[in-house]
Amino acid sequence: MRIELVKRKEHSRTMALLSPLIAVALTALSAAILFSITGHNPLIGLYKFFIEPLTQQWSLEATIDKATPLILIGCGLAVCYLSNNWNIGAEGQFVVGALFGSALPILFPSFENVITLPLMLLFGAIGGALWALIPALLKTRFNTNEILTSLMLVYVAGLLLDYLVRGPWRDPDGYNFPESRIFSDAATLPEVFGGAMSLSAPITIIIAIVLAIVLAKTLKGFEIRVMGESPRAGSFAGFSAKRLTLFSFAIAGALAGLAGTMEVSGALNQLLPSISPGYGFTAIIVAFLGRLNPIGIIIAGFVLALSYIGGEGVQSAMGVSNEIASVIQGLLLFFVLACDTLILYRIRMVSRRVPTGETSHV
Amino acid sequence: MFEAVLLTVITAATPLLIAAVGELVVERSGVLNLGVEGMMIMGAVIGFAVANQTGSGSLGVVAAVVAGMAMSALFAFLVLFLVANQVATGLALTILGIGLSGMIGEAFIGVPGLDLPQLYIPVLSEIPFIGPVFFQQDALVYLSFALVAVVAYCLFRTRLGLVLRAVGDNHGSAHALGYSVLKVRFMAILFGGACAGLAGAYLSLAYTPQWVENMTAGRGWIALALVVFSSWLPLRVVVGAYLFGAVSVLNLHAQALEFDIPSQLLSSLPYLATIGVLVLISANRRLTLVNTPACLGKPFVPDR
Amino acid sequence: MKRSQKEIKEKGNEHMKSLLKATVAAVAFAAAGSAANAADVKACFVYVGPVGDFGWTYQHDQGRLAVEEKFGDKVETAYLESVPEGPDAERAIERFAREGCNVIFTTSFGYMNPTIKVAKKFPDVKFEHATGYKTADNVATYNSKFHEGRYIIGQIAAKQSKTGTAGYIASFPIPEVVAGINAFLLGAQSVNPDFKVKVVWVNTWFDPGKEADAAKALIDQGADIITQHTDSTAPLQVAQERGAHGFGQASDMINFAKDAQYTAIIDDWAPYYIERVQEVLDDKWHAGSAWDGLAEGHVVMAPYTNLPPDVVEMAKATEAKIKGGWEPFTGPITKQDGSVAAEDGVTLDDGAILGMNWYVQGVDDKLPE
């Protein structure tokens, strides 16, 4: 007996709905095993990890706060990945966007009026887009591998932020500590719905929905998908791969930069030597978990944020180490990727004697 | 002085070199495994743990290699058998590896490590300058050079290498010729995992003999960059790894010599240099097109 | 063989049973609401690194464990590790405030503004922020005078160095690190006025590989004493390997460098944590700013090893002098640019030390802007 995959004639709709559920169930099972082998009660662990955060208002709000940047960055990355552009440097674009966005309140603190915030957001998007265009230009111009250049630029962006916050942009009244001045109210993203969430959450949801429509209904969306699936067919249709590379990187960078600015303006209120707990990298997972679909990404972002909040919950309540959350995230992603196979393929048992030649047995 | 600097560069470059050579073979077979960092850190923690428990550095090294291979087998299962997206799977492998290694390593924090003995090659190691640099290193340094030589030879002078390159360049034709694309890729991925695990062991047993969480500190990613930097040629990986090691070590020397440059700029030099060289190399179309595995990152599902 | 397997199986069954029982009890408990705390006081800790860094966070966690040991059932503790500075920190602190913590220790400078923010929302919870400068009615700050220890190791370095040069691996140019470099050099100059210190900024608190490379670079450039304001044991291991010497940072690192470590500057947070938790228990807690050193036992010198008796004597004498109230930053102190920082006999005030952004004369480096 051997097991092999057989391609389905078309996507299985049932599996498309079922596979994430199977993946979550498998993750929960592995998490339970992990809890018990580390000497913790698996049921309490699962409850604290997956359910408790949903039962309290403050933890729900915290989950939304955490999910927002992940969703926004993930949406931009989806545009890149759909069109076969492997931007994994969103972390750097997030940081540079935040730097551009913060330039106004830091360099011109007295510039306080109604357009301060919109200008900051605009600068943030531009900054992120410019940073993202570097690997895009290197790719279109010199054929340089964008995975690596965009990644290298993450480190450079981090050091640039570090330099600015410890040097020229340091708070003049901050006893030389590495932090910028605190933003004025005019430069602070307001809270909405009675303080339940930052304005960034509704902005993000609107952008995701708009993007979903663009991808599904417009010519641009068609172009992105065609060029991703078959660049040759796309070029016959008159689409330019190079232009699309620049476009998708710019969109991804702009959204990451916007997320960075909103994070700095809404949550931090100042620049610090490090402003992102790896949002740009986690968003890659979010993009894939959400199947590169903005609506899926909203859900995926929420699930992943939940895993962070839940991870802290089990840590503080049960003394489980911080690593367990990262193991569970890794497993979740593995299971989702594995289960998604079922959408395109079905599994078949074949008896040994069938001479199949090249098979994918493991 | 120069000799001492060179010695430092060698230790900084060796883990990069080992991991990069492994990944080069993986990519030559047409698979992109972004999980080098995760496999490396698992190698580091398992290598340390086993060496610590058994008192044998060599057993630790072997265990690290096995750990790296186990991680890579997981990756292979997903991307080859389940045809999962390689980029996402590789990232997941890194996340998983960092988490798992932290959990496993908890018991070994603050425990001094076992230092791998340095191999002094008699007579030769006493030659001034050349002796200490070339014949007075720990075993893994020699191994890294042997590894490069073997990979370079196999890749371009043997049938095995020919098949591997064929699979990476055109999996359809390789399949039609009767080669098992998935088997070749599986082996290549395992080899990559073994190398990453070995590189991890070098970190926790030779470079800084101890276990601390996150001790790979991004070296897996650098190894990935080096593969492209080398345009998939093993001998160039050596150049790249040593160049990178040299830039990061010289940065520290420049500071100690009081160059008046922001340290952040110096710290970002290795990354900028990598981008610069990537551009130079990839701008040369003839060179890249010849060596780039054409099927890199593309999944292969045999038709039946 | 068979029997032992059976035994294992039985044990496993027992284990399963007790696990099930515990599960039922715990779920019931969770359902009943986790308000009922057996302990009188819950003390919670937010850490910036993993408890396994064997440096900064490790020492804070040792302090937490000391609190548990001292108070037993009376005090419950909890911690969150590797909490990034920023919004995650705010959430972590708020979680503790909501989960019924009575006192929350936030142990990184970057937690300052989040701590203040959350403290405003929870006036009944007491907050303790390490290394910051903002206080409130329910926010105290605490820090230790690590520079006292650095003065002593500076003296040892000058006595022991043959090349007259020490290498200093520095993390980030914040006042605490700069003050450490200055104190080290002042100590060294008190023994050998021509003593030099070479500084390398590695821009990280923790990267064993990079710290090791920096140590090697410094040794290659003529330093035979290595000291560091980063958290790993790697520099000491390099010193050990290369026959140089050095000092432990944050914890006693003698196990990593038996022949190379002269002493270590140990952060001992236990006395402070025990004192403050006791005050919470007695309802006597007040916000304030604690900044203590050798005298109060918050900074502890590890045993002096690998040193000749006269140097040990000198180090102990200096230690006693500092414990007696002498401040290492006592004039005459000349800045790098030649201007006077403190006249003869004048002591710098706490503000000047906590906000230090200049080098003393003799540092072989330019302070990063």
Image: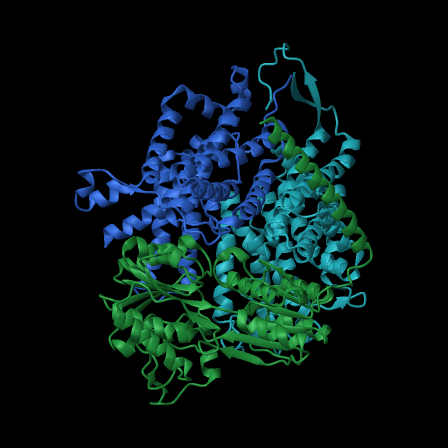
Q: Quadrant of residue C112?
A: bottom right
Colour mode of the rendering: by chain
Across the whole image, how many numbered discs are drawn on residues?
A: 0
- In this rendering, is residue B110 above or below C75? above
In the figure, is residue C7 to the left or right of B53?
Answer: right
User: Which x, y percent locates residue C105?
Assistant: 61, 69
**In the foreground, C37 or C182:** C37
| Colour for chain C in the figure | green
Residue A11, picture quadrant: top right
Shown colour of chain A:
cyan
**Side of C323 where A12 appears, left or right:** right
Location of residue B271 with respect to B234 vertically, above or below: below
Q: Residue at x 65, y 79 (%)?
A: C285
Is C172 or B63 nearer to us in this picture?
B63
> Taking the image as drawn, is residue B94 in sight?
yes
Judging by colour alone, the chain drawn in blue in this rendered image is: B
Assign the N terminus of chain B to one quadrant of the image.
bottom left
Residue A149 position, x and y percent, is 49, 47
Which residue is at 41% across, 46% downward? B203
